[in-house]
Amino acid sequence: MADVERPGAQEWVPDGAGLEELRSASAECRGCELWKDAEQVVFSAGQRGARIMLVGEQPGDQEDRTGEPFIGPAGRVLDDALADAGIPRGEAYVTNAVKHFRHHVRGKRRIHDKPGVAHIEACHPWLDAEMRVISPAVVVALGATAGRALLGRPVRITAERGALTEGPQGARVLITTHPSALLRLRGREGWDEAYDRLVADLEIARDAARA
């Protein structure tokens, strides 16, 4: 089976829509096959006018069940890092490159599957519309999937993180690691360094957004 069975989300994205209209319309999106096995669409958290936009990969299991982005273990890491970087979570707009949870079932567990390039492209009209409405000064790409969605090319986290790059719609893009990557280090050597680097990257985004 192909990754994506439909041509993309564009026909479900209302022209010129505001944020709440986009959120409402996203529930009906059938731009790819991922909606079939997901509990619901997970659109975003935050308001128009946010100077910093945070873009992750896709919802996880807990996000899919509640409809809210970044509320699971990775979300708690992100909350801590934002606080340490001096960025109130309520002042940032948080979303994902792909709006439905891609997974497979193993026993009673739903196991995360990385979204394919076709899923990123199919969902891109939503991200493009969000950027139009929010008009952020800085967009933080949390991980390689988000970086690809924003820049339209593969990205290498180790080589490109922490640098501000010209992105779509006049925003600057900063690439950093996804908080879920830090979870594998929690309680082990390397955690403190990895966490401090995430905070440092967010501080760069904070300063750029306030400039």
Image (cartoon, grey):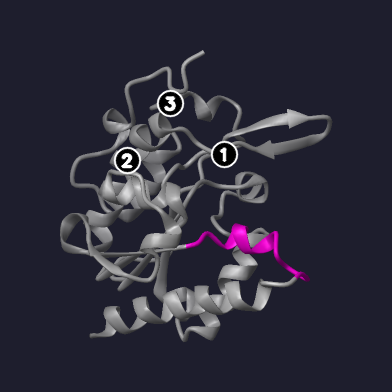
Q: Residues within 10 Å of mark 2 (few under 14, many from 20)?
A: many
The circle on residue 101 is 1
Instruction: Give the CA distance from mark 1 to mark 2.
Output: 15 Å
The residue under the point 60% across, 63% down is 75
Q: Earlier in the sequence, mark 1 or mark 2?
A: 1
The residue under the point 48% across, 83% down is 85
Q: Which residues are magenta?
A: 177-188
Disc 2, SS: helix
Disc 1, SS: loop
> In the current view of this chain or complex, which residue is farthest to the top?
1
Q: Is residue 114 left or right of residue 183?
A: left
Q: Which residue is mark 2?
A: 124
Type of amino acid under label 3 = Cys
Type of amino acid under label 1 = Phe
Q: Nearer the viewer, residue 162 or 62?
A: 162
Residue 45 visible from this viewpoint: no
Q: Residues within 10 Å of mark 1 (few under 14, many from 20)?
A: many
Q: Which residue is mark 3?
A: 32
Callout 3–callout 2 Cβ contact below 8 Å: no
Magenta span contains residue 166:
no
The residue under the point 45% across, 42% down is 98
Q: Residues within 10 Å of mark 3 (few under 14, many from 20)?
A: many
